[in-house]
């Protein structure tokens, strides 16, 4: 028996989101139904609504969520009804060329549910990032469910499902930040602040936050930034060098994805340092770099997809650190809202007023 539940749908490019009745089929082989408890509002949801991802409207939005498994389909062994899970969009296949090389965090063939959720008239919905979690219950592949400590509140745990994991992983996984490193983070929204928190966790001793908004720089300090720089009034490259003995930072993280910012990250890096790009660029953007500097500075220019996370490895570990008071996930939650308030939350996000609005079901 399929179920009908309420969900947040983007019907057309740029149109305000609406609450719709969504038909959720019973889980088929390899699938699971998850009763959503909380789901963060991410920039990617807004990009879907604006047609910036693709044109496969209507979208069922939401993808940063935690909840409880309600039912599983045939052959599912990793989760059972009642399990408390964080949803992920990297259900690794175990068989693609990257998984076979022992690098499942790059998996090139991740799983999503096979069946489709629909509107009541049968219109097929495209779930954001293969999840769709601004909804009472959603249908996912069982591999998209990662069990974590059930005593962690869903408002905090769900954040690991996307932006916060991307930022933490940009520092800890992609950037390989270690004890005593210096780190510069360009852009201090949710992803950038998570990169700062990740650098702090990993033992970085100098962490420079860079943004154009003094309010965001204040937030960044609360996540562990030791220095801050308003790039509107101070040259960030010179500033990073000034607080790193004139050398530049070991790891520079671009959480914006703008060519000018990337160039700053490139220039603010010490010899043999690493640049990590975690901000998503506009598809039309190009960059130009002095080629001799690419060679002469050595090190690595890397991109970070979803923080190069492996959900089964990283989510339970990060929740444990949260429970021990070593990773303040609650600080990312600017407000909790109802499923009816997602459109307003987009506007607050556009105005830079919130790190995360989290829908509580
Ligand atoms: Zn794979
Ligand atoms: Zn996201």
Image: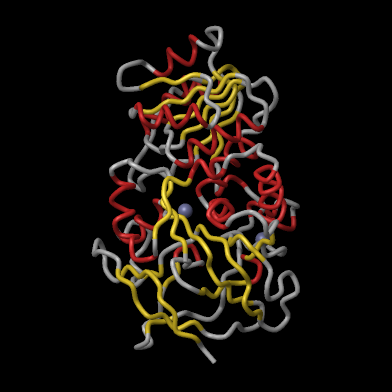
Residue shown at 60%/30% (left/top)? Answer: 199
> From the viewer's perspective, is 76 left or right of 209?
right
Give the image quarter of residue 352. top left
Give the image quarter of residue 279. top left
Residue 306, above or below 91:
above
- Seen from the viewer's position, the closer of residues 323 and 271 is 323
Pinpoint residue 60: horizontal percent, then vertical percent.
41, 70
Pinpoint residue 232: horizontal percent, then vertical percent.
30, 22
**Which residue is most to the bottom?**
1
Residue shown at 64%/54% (left/top)? Answer: 152
Residue 195, above or below 108:
above
> From the viewer's perspective, is 99 left or right of 220?
right
**Which residue is most to the left?**
15
Question: How many discs mark residues in the rendered view?
Answer: 0
Quadrant placement of the N terminus = bottom right
Residue shown at 46%/37% (left/top)? Answer: 255
Residue shown at 74%/69% (left/top)? Answer: 78
> From the viewer's perspective, is 119 left or right of 191?
left
- Seen from the viewer's position, the closer of residues 94 and 159 is 159
Q: How is the image coloured?
A: secondary structure
Residue 173, above or below 89:
above
Pinpoint residue 185: horizontal percent, then vertical percent.
49, 29
Give the image quarter of residue 92. bottom right
Pinpoint residue 20: horizontal percent, then vertical percent.
34, 77
């Amino acid at each position: 028996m399929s179920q009908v539940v309420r969900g947040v749908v983007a019907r057309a490019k740029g149109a305000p989101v609406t609450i719709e009745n969504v038909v959720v089929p019973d889980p088929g082989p390899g699938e699971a139904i998850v009763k959503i408890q909380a789901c963060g509002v991410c920039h990617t949801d807004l990009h879907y609504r604006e047609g910036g991802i693709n044109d496969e409207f209507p979208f069922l939005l939401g993808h940063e969520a935690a909840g409880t498994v309600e039912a599983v389909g045939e052959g599912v062994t990793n989760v059972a009804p009642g399990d408390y899970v964080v949803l992920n969009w990297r259900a690794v296949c175990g068989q693609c060329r990257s998984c076979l090389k022992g690098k499942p965090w790059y998996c090139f063939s991740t799983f999503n549910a096979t069946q489709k959720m629909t509107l009541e008239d049968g219109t097929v919905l495209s779930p954001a990032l293969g999840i769709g979690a601004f909804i009472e219950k959603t249908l996912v592949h069982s591999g998209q469910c990662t069990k974590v400590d059930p005593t962690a509140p869903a408002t905090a745990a769900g954040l690991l499902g996307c932006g916060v994991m991307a930022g933490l992983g940009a520092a800890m996984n992609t950037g390989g930040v270690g004890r005593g490193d210096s780190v510069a983070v360009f852009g201090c929204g949710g992803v950038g602040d998570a990169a700062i928190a990740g650098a702090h966790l990993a033992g970085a001793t100098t962490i420079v936050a860079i943004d154009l908004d003094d309010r965001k720089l204040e937030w960044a300090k609360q996540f562990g930034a030791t220095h801050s720089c308003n790039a509107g009034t101070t040259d960030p490259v010179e500033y990073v060098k000034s607080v790193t003995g004139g050398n530049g930072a070991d790891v520079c993280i671009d959480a914006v994805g703008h060519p000018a910012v990337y160039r700053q990250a490139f220039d603010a890096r010490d010899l043999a340092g690493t640049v990590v790009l975690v901000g998503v660029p506009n598809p039309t953007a190009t960059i130009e770099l002095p080629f001799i500097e690419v060679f002469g500075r050595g090190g690595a220019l890397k991109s970070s997809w979803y923080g190069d996370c492996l959900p089964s490895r990283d989510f339970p570990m990060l929740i444990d650190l949260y429970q021990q008071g070593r990773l303040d996930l609650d600080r990312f939650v600017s407000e909790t809202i109802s499923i009816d308030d997602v459109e307003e939350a987009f506007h607050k996000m556009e105005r830079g007023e919130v790190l995360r609005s989290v829908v509580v079901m």
